[in-house]
Image: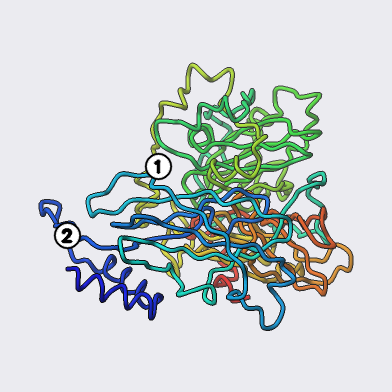
Amino acid sequence: MKQQVRAFNALARRSPLLCLAFLLGLVACGGDDQSFRVLPVERGLSVREFGLSPDDPSPLQEAVAWVTARDASAILLHFTGVSQTELSKPGFDPGALSYGTLALSAVSEEGNRGFRRWEVKLPIRGDGEALVYFLEAQAEGDSLLIPAGGANESLVVSAQPIVIDFEWPDWPPLSQEIPCAGDSRRVLDGAEDQATLAGSFPFEDIRNPDWRRVGGGSILGNAAGVTQGVGVEWEGQYYFFPLAIMLWNEVSNQRMGSLQTALSYCPLTDTALLFDTGFDPDNLGKAMFYTPAGLFNSNLSVGVKGRTLIEPSPYNQMLGFAFAGPDVNRCLRALPSYQVDSSVWIRLHPETWILNGDTKLAEEFDWVRRDNPYSLYWRFHEELRAPVAHEDSRLKNKEHVLGILGGTDPVAIPMSREDFVHHTSVAGIDVVVFLQSGIAIALERRHPLTGAPMRFSETRAMFRGLRLYRDDSSEPSLWTMEGVAVSGPLKGRRLAWVPSMSAFWFAWYAIYPETRFELPGEG
């Protein structure tokens, strides 16, 4: 065994990257270990994993270097800071730099294969300073550099300082209005639920929302384990609508700033729409609240409860207009919203308000303790609980797409498992779609000053845990995926939100069979 360790360490010194690949290969291809087998613990200096947390720390951000190693007596971090200007010069030689050294500390007990985790906090870098580093594992008489053989192959985390020192801008309007596809002739295709055209609305919509700050949002610890919700930013306030509540009530009515709004959520199609009701929030009558009103192509329709019981006006959520009754062809005004996990939303907007139910429905609905009645339905692609008029097999039924509500020019983009940037145009508007951490957002990619279309690319820079994007203008700025420029000449500007929603593919196609289908990243 000692001879094998010495040979392995000699290989590490000559070609550490090959050595690391060999190590990782051993871990990945260790065979089919059965739970009833007791595997012998190998000995000798070995490294299984290493890195930084977060993966790409920005300056002015605390970070941790970590290594998972076996039989190490010490692990060292060799590091230095370099200005971004120096880093980008031709012929930059990291081998000529002077490196400081920090010792990592073991923070875990030895695991079942002999590995322990080691960590050390990095000094916070200055504004504009890049991090250059490499790691070294040591045992008695042995040393293994990770992952490079020296400073010439050191890892570099570029400097992208992100300091927010401006008031977060509101959503601007689109450069031109996208016409609503309000044409009732396209709707009556045999896929309507009878409740949609009836005057009875038996559901309990939310009209007296109970808002809590993050610390008081007990619904986030619901028994069903549903952590997803709908994030909304409007007139300087942030709101989060947990699906653990919306699964049961489907429509929530609330005032947001100067508007009376409603948020509808359809669990059969996993779609959400926030819209302006048009009602005066200071003068609400009994017939000024939206409520579930049936289905069209398995997707939720909403209506005004009690407005005209003889002849109701159902609005389909994904179409966004009324297809019957006195309001036929009238369109709803969609407001910015997107589906997101609560942990991501709270990290982005820690000052958010969280919907915790309805003060008058608390006894009837114990949202915290309720289960998720759709958990199996969401998992099985074959099960549909309502008829649809059109079907398509390019994706599985319940794969998610971002559907862009382009009026007569709708677009569907599959929400793949990998992050992407997608450029397209919808109804004459240049659009960029960002997908990151399961969130998909469509924005108008129009330069706020010149009006020229921009293209975007990912960067290594992070803001509150999400990657930033760089535009391709001659003097680029860095942008959040919510369309805010956080550095560069456009700092403090914002891109317009393009009406869109994530949806199950079967539902989007059933309602928009004419949709353009675009694969992510091809635009």
Where's residue 44, x and y in %?
25, 63
Where's residue 491, x and y in %?
82, 56
Residue 190 shows up from this direction: no
Left or right placement of residue 497 versus residue 415 in this view: right
Q: Residue at x 58, y 73 (%)?
A: 521
Residue 91 in which image quadrant: bottom right
Q: Is residue 258 above or below residue 97?
A: above
> Dot 2 surroundings within 10 Å: few (below 14), some, or many (20 or more)?
few
Residue 492 shows up from this direction: yes
Q: Is residue 302 above or below residue 499?
A: above
Where's residue 262, x and y in %?
67, 36
What number is the disc on residue 374?
Answer: 1
Whether tag 2 and tag 1 are in contact, CB under 8 A, the answer is: no
Q: Is residue 333 or residue 519 the one in the foreground? A: 519
**SS state under label 2:** loop
Amino acid type, callout 2: Asp
Mark-to-mark CA distance, 2 and 1: 35 Å
Q: Residue at x 54, y 69 (%)?
A: 155
What number is the disc on residue 227?
Answer: none
Of callouts 2 and 1, the N-terminal one? 2
Q: Which residue is mark 2?
A: 33
Left or right placement of residue 369 versus residue 293 in this view: left
Where's residue 142, x and y in %?
32, 66
